[in-house]
Image (tube, helix red, strand yellow):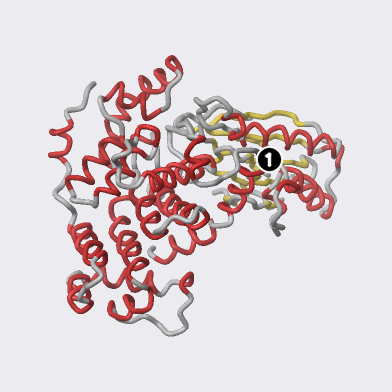
Amino acid sequence: MTLDLDKLLNRVDAIPHNFHIAIKVAKMLDDFNVNIQELSKIIGTDQSFTVQLLKLCNSAQYGFSRKIVTVNDAITRLGFKTLKSLVFVVVSKGSFNRQIEGYDLAKGELWRNSLSCAVYSKYLAEISGYKDPELAFTAGLLRDIGKLIIHEYVKEEYDNIVNLVTSENIGFSEAEEKILGYNHSQVGAKIAAKWNFPKVLEETIEFHHSPKKAKNTCVDKKLINIVHVADSVAMMLGVGIGNDGMMHSLNITSLENLGIDINSVGIETLISDMVDLNSEIDLLMASIS
Amino acid sequence: MSNVINIGMSQIEITSKPGTVLVAPSLGSCIGLAIYDPILKLGVMAHIVLPDSAKILKQTEHCGKYADTAVPEMLKKLFAVGANKNKLIVKMAGGAQMFNLEKGANVLNIGLRNTLAVKTALSKEGLTLVKSDTGGNKGRTFKLDVQTGIFSVKLIGQEEVEL
Protein backbone atom coordinates (compact mmCIF):
# COMPACT_ATOMS: atom_id res chain seq x y z
CA MET A 1 0.00 0.00 0.00
CA THR A 2 1.41 3.38 -0.94
CA LEU A 3 -0.04 6.42 0.72
CA ASP A 4 -1.31 9.29 -1.33
CA LEU A 5 0.30 12.04 0.71
CA ASP A 6 -1.80 14.88 -0.71
CA LYS A 7 -4.98 12.94 0.02
CA LEU A 8 -3.71 12.12 3.51
CA LEU A 9 -2.87 15.74 4.26
CA ASN A 10 -6.26 16.85 2.99
CA ARG A 11 -7.78 14.63 5.65
CA VAL A 12 -5.76 16.39 8.32
CA ASP A 13 -7.90 19.10 9.80
CA ALA A 14 -7.04 22.64 9.14
CA ILE A 15 -4.79 23.81 11.92
CA PRO A 16 -6.45 23.19 15.29
CA HIS A 17 -7.43 26.48 16.88
CA ASN A 18 -5.01 26.09 19.78
CA PHE A 19 -2.02 25.44 17.52
CA HIS A 20 -3.00 28.55 15.62
CA ILE A 21 -2.60 30.53 18.86
CA ALA A 22 0.68 28.80 19.70
CA ILE A 23 2.30 29.58 16.36
CA LYS A 24 1.12 33.18 16.43
CA VAL A 25 2.40 33.58 20.00
CA ALA A 26 5.70 31.83 19.16
CA LYS A 27 6.28 34.18 16.25
CA MET A 28 5.48 37.23 18.38
CA LEU A 29 7.80 36.01 21.13
CA ASP A 30 10.62 35.69 18.58
CA ASP A 31 10.30 39.38 17.92
CA PHE A 32 12.35 41.44 20.37
CA ASN A 33 9.96 44.36 19.96
CA VAL A 34 6.95 42.28 20.94
CA ASN A 35 4.03 44.20 22.34
CA ILE A 36 3.22 42.41 25.60
CA GLN A 37 -0.30 43.84 25.80
CA GLU A 38 -1.11 42.55 22.34
CA LEU A 39 0.42 39.18 23.16
CA SER A 40 -1.67 38.88 26.34
CA LYS A 41 -4.74 39.72 24.31
CA ILE A 42 -4.10 36.94 21.79
CA ILE A 43 -3.47 34.35 24.50
CA GLY A 44 -6.46 35.60 26.45
CA THR A 45 -8.87 35.06 23.54
CA ASP A 46 -9.14 31.40 24.51
CA GLN A 47 -10.21 31.13 28.11
CA SER A 48 -9.64 27.42 28.70
CA PHE A 49 -6.22 27.75 27.08
CA THR A 50 -5.37 30.65 29.40
CA VAL A 51 -6.52 28.71 32.47
CA GLN A 52 -4.36 25.70 31.55
CA LEU A 53 -1.38 27.89 30.73
CA LEU A 54 -1.53 29.70 34.08
CA LYS A 55 -1.96 26.39 35.92
CA LEU A 56 1.20 25.11 34.26
CA CYS A 57 3.10 28.34 35.00
CA ASN A 58 2.13 27.96 38.67
CA SER A 59 3.20 24.33 38.93
CA ALA A 60 5.79 23.31 41.46
CA GLN A 61 8.76 23.07 39.10
CA TYR A 62 8.90 26.85 38.63
CA GLY A 63 8.71 27.39 42.37
CA PHE A 64 7.08 30.81 42.55
CA SER A 65 5.90 31.72 46.04
CA ARG A 66 3.53 34.38 44.70
CA LYS A 67 0.95 33.00 42.29
CA ILE A 68 0.99 34.02 38.62
CA VAL A 69 -2.52 35.29 37.92
CA THR A 70 -2.34 36.98 34.53
CA VAL A 71 -0.70 36.28 31.21
CA ASN A 72 1.17 39.57 31.58
CA ASP A 73 2.54 38.34 34.86
CA ALA A 74 3.57 35.02 33.28
CA ILE A 75 5.52 36.77 30.52
CA THR A 76 7.35 39.00 32.99
CA ARG A 77 8.26 36.27 35.44
CA LEU A 78 8.91 33.27 33.20
CA GLY A 79 10.47 35.05 30.26
CA PHE A 80 9.61 34.79 26.57
CA LYS A 81 11.39 31.53 25.81
CA THR A 82 9.94 29.49 28.67
CA LEU A 83 6.48 30.86 28.04
CA LYS A 84 6.75 29.86 24.38
CA SER A 85 7.54 26.24 25.23
CA LEU A 86 4.71 26.10 27.80
CA VAL A 87 2.28 27.43 25.20
CA PHE A 88 3.19 24.45 23.00
CA VAL A 89 2.77 22.03 25.93
CA VAL A 90 -0.78 23.26 26.50
CA VAL A 91 -1.80 23.08 22.84
CA SER A 92 -0.14 19.71 22.21
CA LYS A 93 -1.98 17.90 24.95
CA GLY A 94 -5.25 17.83 23.00
CA SER A 95 -3.56 16.15 20.04
CA PHE A 96 -1.05 13.84 21.77
CA ASN A 97 -3.01 12.66 24.80
CA ARG A 98 -5.08 10.06 23.00
CA GLN A 99 -4.92 6.42 22.02
CA ILE A 100 -2.68 5.80 19.00
CA GLU A 101 -3.94 2.41 18.00
CA GLY A 102 -1.63 1.69 15.06
CA TYR A 103 1.44 1.95 17.30
CA ASP A 104 -0.31 0.09 20.13
CA LEU A 105 -0.16 3.13 22.41
CA ALA A 106 -2.88 3.47 25.06
CA LYS A 107 -4.24 6.92 25.88
CA GLY A 108 -1.55 8.93 27.66
CA GLU A 109 1.44 6.92 26.42
CA LEU A 110 2.38 9.12 23.44
CA TRP A 111 1.74 12.17 25.64
CA ARG A 112 4.17 10.94 28.32
CA ASN A 113 6.65 9.93 25.64
CA SER A 114 6.45 13.38 24.00
CA LEU A 115 6.83 15.28 27.27
CA SER A 116 9.77 13.04 28.20
CA CYS A 117 11.45 13.68 24.85
CA ALA A 118 10.89 17.42 25.43
CA VAL A 119 12.48 17.38 28.91
CA TYR A 120 15.35 15.14 27.74
CA SER A 121 15.97 17.42 24.72
CA LYS A 122 16.15 20.48 26.94
CA TYR A 123 18.61 18.69 29.24
CA LEU A 124 20.82 17.62 26.31
CA ALA A 125 20.71 21.19 25.00
CA GLU A 126 21.90 22.49 28.36
CA ILE A 127 24.77 20.04 28.80
CA SER A 128 25.96 20.48 25.24
CA GLY A 129 25.90 24.28 25.34
CA TYR A 130 23.13 24.62 22.75
CA LYS A 131 21.95 28.21 22.36
CA ASP A 132 18.22 27.73 23.03
CA PRO A 133 17.21 24.90 25.41
CA GLU A 134 13.56 25.98 25.32
CA LEU A 135 13.47 25.54 21.55
CA ALA A 136 14.95 22.06 22.07
CA PHE A 137 12.08 21.36 24.50
CA THR A 138 9.47 22.31 21.89
CA ALA A 139 11.22 20.38 19.12
CA GLY A 140 11.33 17.26 21.33
CA LEU A 141 7.70 17.68 22.25
CA LEU A 142 6.43 17.84 18.66
CA ARG A 143 8.72 15.39 16.84
CA ASP A 144 6.21 12.52 16.64
CA ILE A 145 3.28 14.55 15.32
CA GLY A 146 3.22 12.39 12.18
CA LYS A 147 2.25 9.33 14.27
CA LEU A 148 -1.12 10.98 14.93
CA ILE A 149 -1.96 10.69 11.24
CA ILE A 150 -0.10 7.70 9.86
CA HIS A 151 -0.87 5.23 12.64
CA GLU A 152 -3.99 3.69 11.12
CA TYR A 153 -2.02 2.75 8.00
CA VAL A 154 0.82 1.36 10.13
CA LYS A 155 -1.74 -0.83 11.86
CA GLU A 156 -2.85 -2.30 8.54
CA GLU A 157 0.69 -2.95 7.32
CA TYR A 158 2.39 -3.67 10.67
CA ASP A 159 3.34 -7.29 9.89
CA ASN A 160 4.80 -6.32 6.52
CA ILE A 161 6.80 -3.47 8.08
CA VAL A 162 8.26 -5.71 10.81
CA ASN A 163 9.05 -8.46 8.29
CA LEU A 164 10.99 -5.94 6.25
CA VAL A 165 12.88 -4.76 9.37
CA THR A 166 14.02 -8.37 9.88
CA SER A 167 14.60 -9.42 6.28
CA GLU A 168 16.41 -6.27 5.12
CA ASN A 169 18.03 -5.32 8.43
CA ILE A 170 16.65 -1.79 8.30
CA GLY A 171 15.09 0.42 10.99
CA PHE A 172 11.34 0.71 11.52
CA SER A 173 11.07 4.16 9.90
CA GLU A 174 12.87 3.05 6.78
CA ALA A 175 10.59 0.00 6.56
CA GLU A 176 7.55 2.25 7.06
CA GLU A 177 8.74 4.35 4.15
CA LYS A 178 9.33 1.32 1.91
CA ILE A 179 5.89 -0.14 2.59
CA LEU A 180 3.76 3.01 2.88
CA GLY A 181 5.76 5.39 0.69
CA TYR A 182 6.31 7.71 3.67
CA ASN A 183 7.34 7.30 7.29
CA HIS A 184 5.87 9.09 10.31
CA SER A 185 8.70 11.65 10.34
CA GLN A 186 8.12 12.68 6.73
CA VAL A 187 4.36 12.87 7.24
CA GLY A 188 4.95 14.89 10.41
CA ALA A 189 7.14 17.36 8.54
CA LYS A 190 4.43 17.82 5.91
CA ILE A 191 1.85 18.51 8.62
CA ALA A 192 4.24 20.96 10.26
CA ALA A 193 4.62 22.77 6.94
CA LYS A 194 0.85 22.78 6.40
CA TRP A 195 0.31 24.21 9.87
CA ASN A 196 2.95 26.83 9.25
CA PHE A 197 5.38 25.68 11.97
CA PRO A 198 8.80 27.38 11.88
CA LYS A 199 11.17 25.68 9.41
CA VAL A 200 13.51 24.58 12.23
CA LEU A 201 10.70 22.47 13.80
CA GLU A 202 9.70 21.03 10.43
CA GLU A 203 13.26 19.79 9.98
CA THR A 204 13.69 18.29 13.46
CA ILE A 205 10.42 16.41 12.92
CA GLU A 206 11.59 15.14 9.51
CA PHE A 207 15.05 13.97 10.58
CA HIS A 208 14.60 12.90 14.21
CA HIS A 209 15.19 9.24 13.26
CA SER A 210 17.67 9.93 10.47
CA PRO A 211 19.98 12.81 11.43
CA LYS A 212 22.51 11.62 8.85
CA LYS A 213 20.06 12.49 6.09
CA ALA A 214 19.80 16.11 7.26
CA LYS A 215 21.49 18.28 4.64
CA ASN A 216 23.93 21.05 5.45
CA THR A 217 21.28 23.49 4.31
CA CYS A 218 19.11 22.56 7.32
CA VAL A 219 18.49 25.46 9.68
CA ASP A 220 19.90 23.74 12.77
CA LYS A 221 21.64 20.35 12.58
CA LYS A 222 22.63 20.40 16.24
CA LEU A 223 18.97 20.59 17.23
CA ILE A 224 18.26 17.55 15.05
CA ASN A 225 21.02 15.64 16.88
CA ILE A 226 19.64 16.70 20.26
CA VAL A 227 16.11 15.52 19.49
CA HIS A 228 17.42 12.30 17.92
CA VAL A 229 19.37 11.37 21.06
CA ALA A 230 16.51 12.39 23.39
CA ASP A 231 14.05 10.32 21.35
CA SER A 232 16.41 7.31 21.49
CA VAL A 233 16.91 7.55 25.26
CA ALA A 234 13.13 7.76 25.81
CA MET A 235 12.83 4.63 23.69
CA MET A 236 15.59 2.77 25.56
CA LEU A 237 13.93 3.63 28.86
CA GLY A 238 10.66 2.26 27.51
CA VAL A 239 8.81 5.55 28.07
CA GLY A 240 5.55 5.24 26.11
CA ILE A 241 7.16 2.55 23.98
CA GLY A 242 4.88 1.29 21.20
CA ASN A 243 4.90 -1.65 18.83
CA ASP A 244 7.82 -0.15 16.89
CA GLY A 245 9.72 -0.88 20.11
CA MET A 246 13.40 -0.16 19.83
CA MET A 247 13.53 -0.96 16.11
CA HIS A 248 15.24 2.34 15.45
CA SER A 249 18.96 3.00 15.49
CA LEU A 250 20.86 5.57 17.50
CA ASN A 251 23.41 7.50 15.48
CA ILE A 252 26.80 7.55 17.21
CA THR A 253 27.78 10.75 15.38
CA SER A 254 24.84 12.57 17.01
CA LEU A 255 26.14 11.58 20.45
CA GLU A 256 29.64 12.75 19.52
CA ASN A 257 28.22 16.01 18.23
CA LEU A 258 26.77 16.66 21.70
CA GLY A 259 30.12 15.94 23.35
CA ILE A 260 29.06 12.65 24.95
CA ASP A 261 31.82 10.12 25.56
CA ILE A 262 31.26 7.05 23.39
CA ASN A 263 32.13 4.41 25.96
CA SER A 264 30.07 2.49 28.49
CA VAL A 265 30.80 4.97 31.30
CA GLY A 266 29.82 7.97 29.16
CA ILE A 267 26.59 6.42 27.91
CA GLU A 268 25.53 4.98 31.30
CA THR A 269 26.25 8.24 33.11
CA LEU A 270 24.12 10.10 30.58
CA ILE A 271 21.21 7.68 31.03
CA SER A 272 21.57 7.72 34.81
CA ASP A 273 21.30 11.53 34.80
CA MET A 274 18.37 11.52 32.37
CA VAL A 275 16.40 9.02 34.47
CA ASP A 276 16.63 11.50 37.34
CA LEU A 277 14.57 13.91 35.21
CA ASN A 278 11.55 11.61 35.45
CA SER A 279 10.24 13.33 38.58
CA GLU A 280 10.19 16.60 36.60
CA ILE A 281 8.20 14.84 33.87
CA ASP A 282 5.72 13.51 36.46
CA LEU A 283 5.26 17.06 37.76
CA LEU A 284 4.64 18.39 34.25
CA MET A 285 2.10 15.63 33.58
CA ALA A 286 0.30 16.40 36.83
CA SER A 287 0.32 20.16 36.18
CA ILE A 288 -1.75 19.86 33.05
CA SER A 289 -3.94 16.91 33.90
CA MET B 1 -10.14 -7.64 41.54
CA SER B 2 -6.38 -7.61 41.92
CA ASN B 3 -4.47 -4.73 43.35
CA VAL B 4 -1.71 -3.58 40.99
CA ILE B 5 1.56 -2.05 42.18
CA ASN B 6 3.33 -0.38 39.25
CA ILE B 7 7.06 -0.23 39.78
CA GLY B 8 8.65 2.81 38.17
CA MET B 9 12.25 3.09 37.06
CA SER B 10 14.74 2.59 39.92
CA GLN B 11 12.05 1.42 42.34
CA ILE B 12 11.80 -1.77 44.42
CA GLU B 13 8.50 -2.96 45.91
CA ILE B 14 7.80 -5.89 48.21
CA THR B 15 4.42 -7.33 49.18
CA SER B 16 2.64 -10.42 50.47
CA LYS B 17 -0.80 -8.85 50.31
CA PRO B 18 -3.19 -11.38 48.75
CA GLY B 19 -4.51 -10.38 45.36
CA THR B 20 -1.62 -8.05 44.63
CA VAL B 21 0.17 -8.05 41.29
CA LEU B 22 3.62 -6.48 41.04
CA VAL B 23 4.12 -4.92 37.60
CA ALA B 24 7.21 -3.54 35.88
CA PRO B 25 5.61 -1.76 32.91
CA SER B 26 7.18 -0.55 29.66
CA LEU B 27 10.56 -2.20 29.92
CA GLY B 28 12.91 -1.20 27.12
CA SER B 29 16.54 -1.87 27.94
CA CYS B 30 15.59 -1.91 31.65
CA ILE B 31 15.13 -5.18 33.55
CA GLY B 32 12.18 -6.27 35.64
CA LEU B 33 13.59 -8.64 38.26
CA ALA B 34 11.27 -10.55 40.59
CA ILE B 35 12.10 -12.82 43.53
CA TYR B 36 9.33 -14.92 45.10
CA ASP B 37 9.02 -16.96 48.30
CA PRO B 38 6.22 -19.50 47.60
CA ILE B 39 5.86 -20.50 51.27
CA LEU B 40 5.20 -16.95 52.49
CA LYS B 41 3.57 -15.95 49.18
CA LEU B 42 5.89 -12.99 49.30
CA GLY B 43 7.24 -11.20 46.22
CA VAL B 44 9.72 -8.43 45.55
CA MET B 45 10.25 -6.71 42.21
CA ALA B 46 12.79 -4.17 40.96
CA HIS B 47 12.80 -2.01 37.81
CA ILE B 48 16.52 -1.88 37.09
CA VAL B 49 17.80 0.79 34.68
CA LEU B 50 21.57 0.31 34.51
CA PRO B 51 24.16 -2.41 35.19
CA ASP B 52 26.75 -0.94 37.48
CA SER B 53 26.58 1.74 40.19
CA ALA B 54 30.37 1.87 40.45
CA LYS B 55 30.65 3.44 36.99
CA ILE B 56 28.50 6.41 37.98
CA LEU B 57 30.28 9.13 39.89
CA LYS B 58 27.14 10.71 41.31
CA GLN B 59 25.70 8.96 44.35
CA THR B 60 22.06 7.97 44.19
CA GLU B 61 19.58 7.10 46.88
CA HIS B 62 17.84 4.62 44.58
CA CYS B 63 19.36 1.16 45.09
CA GLY B 64 16.91 -0.18 42.51
CA LYS B 65 18.49 1.82 39.71
CA TYR B 66 21.51 -0.47 39.27
CA ALA B 67 21.74 -4.27 39.04
CA ASP B 68 24.64 -4.52 41.50
CA THR B 69 22.80 -2.59 44.23
CA ALA B 70 19.24 -3.75 43.50
CA VAL B 71 19.84 -7.47 44.11
CA PRO B 72 21.30 -7.15 47.67
CA GLU B 73 18.60 -4.62 48.55
CA MET B 74 15.85 -6.99 47.36
CA LEU B 75 17.31 -9.80 49.50
CA LYS B 76 17.60 -7.48 52.49
CA LYS B 77 13.89 -6.68 52.18
CA LEU B 78 12.97 -10.38 51.80
CA PHE B 79 15.05 -11.56 54.76
CA ALA B 80 13.71 -8.76 56.96
CA VAL B 81 10.28 -10.40 56.73
CA GLY B 82 11.52 -13.96 57.14
CA ALA B 83 11.98 -15.26 53.58
CA ASN B 84 13.85 -18.53 53.17
CA LYS B 85 16.80 -18.19 50.78
CA ASN B 86 16.62 -21.85 49.72
CA LYS B 87 13.03 -21.55 48.53
CA LEU B 88 13.34 -18.40 46.43
CA ILE B 89 12.23 -18.37 42.79
CA VAL B 90 13.95 -15.78 40.61
CA LYS B 91 12.81 -14.63 37.16
CA MET B 92 13.45 -11.60 34.98
CA ALA B 93 12.34 -9.91 31.77
CA GLY B 94 13.44 -6.93 29.68
CA GLY B 95 16.90 -5.98 28.44
CA ALA B 96 15.85 -5.16 24.89
CA GLN B 97 18.30 -3.36 22.66
CA MET B 98 18.26 -0.58 20.10
CA PHE B 99 18.36 -1.68 16.50
CA ASN B 100 22.05 -1.15 15.87
CA LEU B 101 23.16 -0.55 12.34
CA GLU B 102 26.48 1.02 12.96
CA LYS B 103 29.92 -0.36 13.63
CA GLY B 104 30.98 0.18 17.20
CA ALA B 105 27.39 0.66 18.35
CA ASN B 106 27.72 -2.21 20.87
CA VAL B 107 28.54 0.38 23.47
CA LEU B 108 24.86 1.40 23.28
CA ASN B 109 23.64 -2.06 24.17
CA ILE B 110 22.56 -1.31 27.72
CA GLY B 111 19.96 -4.09 27.56
CA LEU B 112 22.56 -6.84 27.22
CA ARG B 113 24.82 -5.26 29.86
CA ASN B 114 21.85 -5.06 32.23
CA THR B 115 21.00 -8.73 31.64
CA LEU B 116 24.56 -9.87 32.29
CA ALA B 117 24.92 -7.63 35.35
CA VAL B 118 21.74 -9.03 36.94
CA LYS B 119 23.00 -12.59 36.36
CA THR B 120 26.35 -11.71 37.94
CA ALA B 121 24.69 -10.02 40.95
CA LEU B 122 22.41 -13.05 41.46
CA SER B 123 25.24 -15.57 41.33
CA LYS B 124 27.25 -13.42 43.75
CA GLU B 125 24.38 -13.88 46.21
CA GLY B 126 24.16 -17.61 45.45
CA LEU B 127 20.79 -17.33 43.70
CA THR B 128 19.77 -19.23 40.58
CA LEU B 129 17.80 -17.59 37.81
CA VAL B 130 14.93 -19.97 37.04
CA LYS B 131 13.70 -18.36 33.85
CA SER B 132 14.06 -15.18 31.84
CA ASP B 133 12.78 -13.44 28.74
CA THR B 134 15.35 -10.89 27.59
CA GLY B 135 16.82 -9.31 24.47
CA GLY B 136 15.26 -8.53 21.11
CA ASN B 137 14.09 -5.02 20.33
CA LYS B 138 10.53 -4.92 21.58
CA GLY B 139 9.16 -3.44 24.79
CA ARG B 140 7.79 -5.70 27.53
CA THR B 141 5.68 -5.65 30.66
CA PHE B 142 6.58 -8.10 33.46
CA LYS B 143 4.22 -9.22 36.23
CA LEU B 144 4.18 -11.32 39.37
CA ASP B 145 0.94 -12.33 41.08
CA VAL B 146 1.99 -12.87 44.69
CA GLN B 147 -1.01 -15.00 45.57
CA THR B 148 -0.59 -17.56 42.79
CA GLY B 149 3.15 -17.14 42.25
CA ILE B 150 2.54 -16.81 38.52
CA PHE B 151 5.07 -14.73 36.62
CA SER B 152 3.99 -13.40 33.23
CA VAL B 153 5.42 -11.33 30.43
CA LYS B 154 3.76 -9.39 27.64
CA LEU B 155 5.64 -8.22 24.58
CA ILE B 156 4.03 -5.07 23.17
CA GLY B 157 1.61 -6.05 20.43
CA GLN B 158 1.42 -9.68 21.62
CA GLU B 159 -0.59 -11.73 24.11
CA GLU B 160 0.56 -12.05 27.70
CA VAL B 161 2.23 -15.41 28.43
CA GLU B 162 3.33 -17.17 31.60
CA LEU B 163 7.05 -17.08 32.25
Query: Can you say whether A213 is above or below B39 in the image?
Result: above
Q: Choose top left, top right, bottom left or bottom right for residue B93.
A: top right
Asked if residue B152 can be seen in this view, the reply is no
Asked if residue A272 can be seen in this view, the reply is yes
Residue in the picture at 20% in, 79% down: A37
**Which element is circle 1 on?**
strand
Task: Name the residue beneath numbered marker 1.
Answer: B33
Q: Choose top left, top right, bottom left or bottom right for residue B28.
A: top right
Q: Which quadrant does the N terminus of chain A fall into?
A: top left
User: x, y percentage for residue A277?
Assistant: 54, 57
A68 vs A95, nearest the viewer: A68
User: x, y percentage for residue A104?
Assistant: 39, 37
What number of labels is visible? 1
Residue in the picture at 27% in, 25% down: A180
B83 vs B56, nearest the viewer: B56
The kind of residue on which mark 1 rests is: Leu
User: x, y percentage for residue A90?
Assistant: 31, 62
Q: Which quadrant does the C terminus of chain A fall into?
A: bottom left
